[in-house]
Amino acid sequence: MAKKSLIFTELTHNQLVKLIVSLGEPAYRAKQMAKWVYWNMALDYDEMTDLPLALRQKLSNEIKLHSLKLAKLVTGKDGTVKALFSLSDGNTIESALMYYDTDRGGERHTVCVSTQVGCAVGCPFCATGQQGFERNLTPGEIIDQVLYFAHYLREQENGSSNGQSKHVSNVVFMGMGEPLANYTNLWQAIETLNSPEGFGLGARNMVISTAGLVPQIKQLAKEKLQVGLAVSLHASDNALRNKLVPLNRKYPLEQLIGACREYNRLAGRRLSFEYTLFNGINDSVKQARALAELLRGLKCHVNLIPANVTSAPSFQPPPRKVILAFEEELNRCHVNVTLRERRGQDINAGCGQLRSQFLKENENKPKRARKIGQSNVV
């Protein structure tokens, strides 16, 4: 049986140091390697010119640098870039790079990262939720999505005539899967992305999205790194949320909002609520008032997101005037709210859409897709 190679991005810095020392090399070689991978975006050992050739040859037999293979790349009219990656076991995941203008006139480059193959929560409006759950991603598979787009931006910068710096400024764990259901691997990836020996991205520049895993929200509140939290709410009463977010049947709104208040108290940080507006389902002014009442006293911000235009006739975006009326009512109720732009509409940039298209084109289905009750989510 062939020896399975280690993956560089799977290793913590301490694990890498121990491995380097076990190979008879000085510990500082680990820092050199990390700089090449996380700062210089090296894709091959030949680029690591300050490492001895013999060591590079030895390492190439011991450690594979990255874990993902690009399967498809599409770019939207608004600049959004969507990538479909193949994993070593034949599964696929997707990530997105989004460009936003900043108040200072520059650009913010946000990478939307997947944390699982598929998803077990099963939200009926989400393409990923209809694919079933396959497995958790490893720390390296999470990190490598960020590094792919960091390298992509570096290439753009090198080809730019104005010489404007292009780098990943924000990471949101809002792609395929329920991030908090993969807590251990997610947190190792976050620590590496934040570490000065790793990617060096500020903790406050990362946001974790959750459908409402109450125990993990409480755990996150106690973590030292000040990573942001966004809760996918979509409804202000249990009856409707049970239909839109099936996880609500296990962790109803009373428990979820209680955990969010605990997060406010322990972490001392504001959190966000994602509220996707669906035509005729959760978009009335009355529902806006109910949402404001539900969130009363919470240190929070609401992101209003018009639904993506999909083939699902039941979950379409409301008319513009309905969206604005909902936003106006939240403002009237003194709720901090932002109406978000829909990104990458022309390239199916919504979560799971590109993968669903890929699976259909290849007449394939997610391997061993588990039903909701078989997952570690519920």
Image: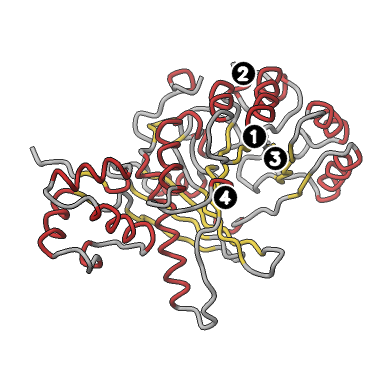
Query: Seen from this angle, which residue lies furthest right?
Result: 332
Nearer the viewer's eye, disc 2 or disc 4? 4
Circle 1 is placed at which residue position? 232
Residue pictured at 67% horizontal, 37% vertical: 269
Earlier sequence position, callout 2 versus callout 4: 4
Residue visible at 26% across and 45% down?
A: 16
| Lower sequence index among marks 3 and 2 | 2
Which residue position holds label 3? 276
Say which label, 1 or 2, has the lower sequence index. Answer: 1
Disc 1 vs disc 3: Cβ atoms closer than 8 Å?
A: yes
Q: Classify 10 Å Cα crowding around label 4: few (below 14), some (14-19), many (20 and above).
A: some
CA–CA distance in space, label 4 to label 3: 22 Å
| Of 284 and 314, the residue lying toward us | 284
Q: Is residue 219 above or below residue 322?
A: above
Which residue type carries mark 2?
Tyr
Question: Which residue in the structure is indicated by mark 2?
Answer: 251
The amino acid type found where label 1 is placed reads Ser
Residue labelled with disc 4: 205
Contact between marks 4 and 3 (CB within 8 A): the answer is no
- Amino acid type indicated by mark 3: Thr
Q: Nearer the viewer, residue 203 or 211?
A: 203
Please rate how many residues cluster around mark 2, counting C-alpha atoms within 10 Å: few if below 14, some from 14 to 19, many from 20: some
